[in-house]
Amino acid sequence: MRFNDTFFSRDERFSIGIDLETDGCYVSIPVSNGLVDYEEYYEIDRETYARFLSDPAVASSFAAECRRRDRDELLIIRPGRNRGTPV
């Protein structure tokens, strides 16, 4: 398993964690394309990771930006043609 969640918010529907392949950090959000449910992973630096862990409300705002696709340049894995929508 590549992605290891270290924090998740069930109410706000996002996770924060460590990418075990790169030792980087991420925020993930659940998405669905009608055929499959999956997560999109957005890269963050260590400083941001620590800040998000200490203040989940700030992380929630970032996750909302990801849902609006305002942070697509940070996607760790680029979506395919049939990109899902946030759930």
Image (spheres, helix red, strand yellow):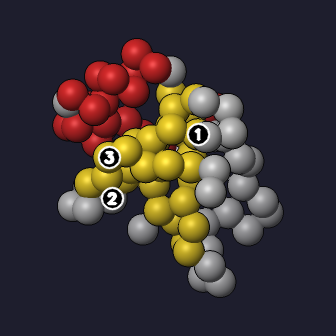
Instruction: Examine the image and state in which quarter residue 38 appears.
Output: bottom right
Residue wearing tag 3? 7
Which residue shows up at 52% across the image and 65% down it?
A: 31
Spatial CA span between label 3 and label 1: 13 Å
Q: Residues within 10 Å of mark 1 (few under 14, many from 20)?
A: some
Q: Secondary structure at mark 2?
A: loop
Q: Residues within 10 Å of mark 3 (few under 14, many from 20)?
A: some
Q: Secondary structure at mark 3?
A: strand
In terms of depth relative to the viewer, which is nearer, 18 or 72? 18
Three-letter amino acid code of the residue under disc 1: Asp
Three-letter amino acid code of the residue under disc 3: Phe
Which residue shows up at 78% across the image and 60% down it?
A: 80
Spatial CA span between label 2 and label 1: 19 Å
Left or right: 33 as drawn, with respect to 28: right
Which residue shows up at 67% across the image and 63% down it?
A: 83
Residue 55 against residue 27 in the figure, above or below? above
In the image as oriented, which residue stretches furthest toward the right? Answer: 81
Q: Earlier in the sequence, mark 2 or mark 1?
A: 2
Q: Say the numbered circle drawn on residue 13.
A: 2
Residue 24, how many percent across, how many down? 58, 29
